[in-house]
Image (cartoon, rainbow, N blue to C red):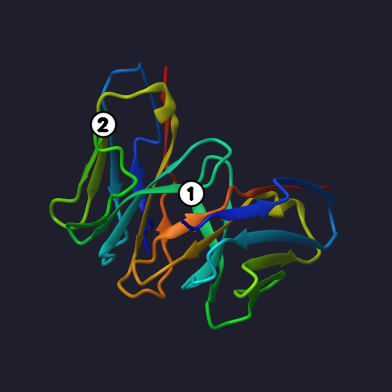
Amino acid sequence: KQEVTQIPAALSVPEGENLVLNCSFTDSAIYNLQWFRQDPGKGLTSLLLIQSSQREQTSGRLNASLDKSSGRSTLYIAASQPGDSATYLCAVTKGASNQFYFGTGTSLTVIP
Amino acid sequence: EAGVAQSPRYKIIEKRQSVAFWCNPISGHATLYWYQQILGQGPKLLIQFQNNGVVDDSQLPKDRFSAERLKGVDSTLKIQPAKLEDSAVYLCASRLPGARETQYFGPGTRLLVL
């Protein structure tokens, strides 16, 4: 059974800092990995999707890397802003059914 | 483009009562998912539909949970009878056909069972 772990569970940083969120998974036979953002009382918003054949994806201040063999992914946020405060979830899929296995999330607070 | 719609947004019931949630996916999205997200945890898949057929319901507690998608569009998720541990956010997601397509999530229904 696929298990996804995210470290740290919570993170608080001052505005402007660069930060890294970590995600690890037990079964390296994944189809793709995706990072989501969840704001309180709202659904999930997709940030970055990395296919299993890719090593990284970038979108603006966000960069996600994938090391499938070691079962790890990182989400790098550059020059953090208070608006980045949210819970960040990673999810891996296995097989064409696209079923997600989610981590427990990292709650990020960016202090102005 | 309209997103995934869910209703109600909030529901408070007493244990042993019944409750139903509704989801309207993005137009054209054949695949629909229901997830349960307990506070402090990541979402857990309950059931996956492809059009009106069930693809995966292995984690659905079938003694009390049921879901349907009769016409391959809207879907309902029902709990009968509810237990205290069913308190959670229920998320609906949909996607286009194709394994590389991402899932789009609705805002969720927050259920509190007293």
Q: Position of residue B84 (x, y in %)?
A: 41, 22
Q: Position of residue B3 (x, y in %)?
A: 38, 57
Q: Which residue is mark 1?
A: A43
Name the secondary structure under disc 2.
loop
Disc 1 element: loop
Task: Give the spatial CA distance, label 1 vs label 2.
Answer: 25 Å
| Depth check, front residue: A98 or B7 | A98
Looking at the image, residue A95 lies above or below residue B114 = below
| Residue B64, disc | 2
Please tell me how crowded label 1 is: few (under 14), some (14-19), or many (20+) other residues with Cα within 10 Å.
many
Query: Dot 2, crowdedness within 10 Å: few (<14), some or many (≥20)?
Result: few
Q: Amino acid at mark 2?
A: Arg
Disc 1 residue type (three-letter): Gly
Q: Quadrant of the C terminus of chain B?
A: top left
- Say if B65 sits above or below A60 in the image: above
Left-right relation of B113 to B42 = left
Q: Nearer the viewer, residue B81 or A88?
A: B81
Instruction: For the residues labelled 1 and 2, say whether their Cβ atoms are less than 8 Å apart.
Output: no
Which image quarter is the N terminus of chain B in?
bottom left
Q: Position of residue B30 (x, y in %)?
A: 25, 65
Residue drawn where x is 17% and y is 57% of the image? B52
Give left or right: position of B16 versus B44: left
* Residue at x-position 41% and y-position 50%: B106
Q: Nearer the viewer, residue A78 or B83?
A: B83
Q: Please identify the quarter of the rendering in which residue A84 is found.
A: bottom right
Furthest residue to the left? B71
Q: Chain of mark 1?
A: A
